[in-house]
Amino acid sequence: MQLNERLISLLSYGAVTLGIALGAFGLVRGGSLFIALGTAGIALKSRHFRTLEFYIPLAIAIALFVVAIALPRGR
């Protein structure tokens, strides 16, 4: 169980870092998708805690994913 949570942590933080890097280089849609996936992974880590600490970050991640999909193409 410890290994799974550690792997989820590393992948989530990696996805957020990659998303920030992609956004900085101009790929805003891809960056937003990676940030949303990373945020969802971080929220899934806290599913054993209180419900509010789980559902609010998960709702923010889902909303960011929806906004990233709805972004118009800038080209």
Image (spheres, helix red, strand yellow):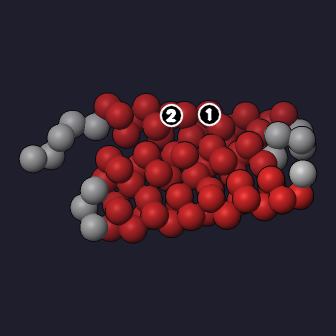
Is 56 displayed left or right of 33 in the figure? right
**Residue 54 coordinates in the image, percent (x, y):** 77, 39
Relative height, residue 31 to residue 65 (above, below): below
Looking at the image, which is closer to me, 54 or 40? 40
Q: Which residue does the image show at 46% across and 64% down from the upper left?
A: 18
Given the image, on which type of amino acid does mark 1 rest? Ala
**Residue drawn at (50%, 34%) of the image:** 63
Q: Which residue matches tag 1?
A: 59
Q: Toward the viewer: 72 or 11?
A: 11
Q: Is residue 57 left or right of residue 62?
A: right
Location of mark 2 (residue): 63
Secondary structure under tag 1 reads helix
Q: How far apart are labels 1 and 2 at the CA level? A: 6 Å
Q: Position of residue 70 (x, y in %)?
A: 32, 31
SS at badge 2 = helix
Circle 1 residues within 10 Å: few <14, some 14–19, many ≥20: some
Query: Looking at the image, which residue is at 73% across and 59% down?
Result: 7
Question: Is mark 1 in CB contact (under 8 Å) with mark 2?
Answer: yes
Q: Which amino acid does label 2 sit on?
A: Ala
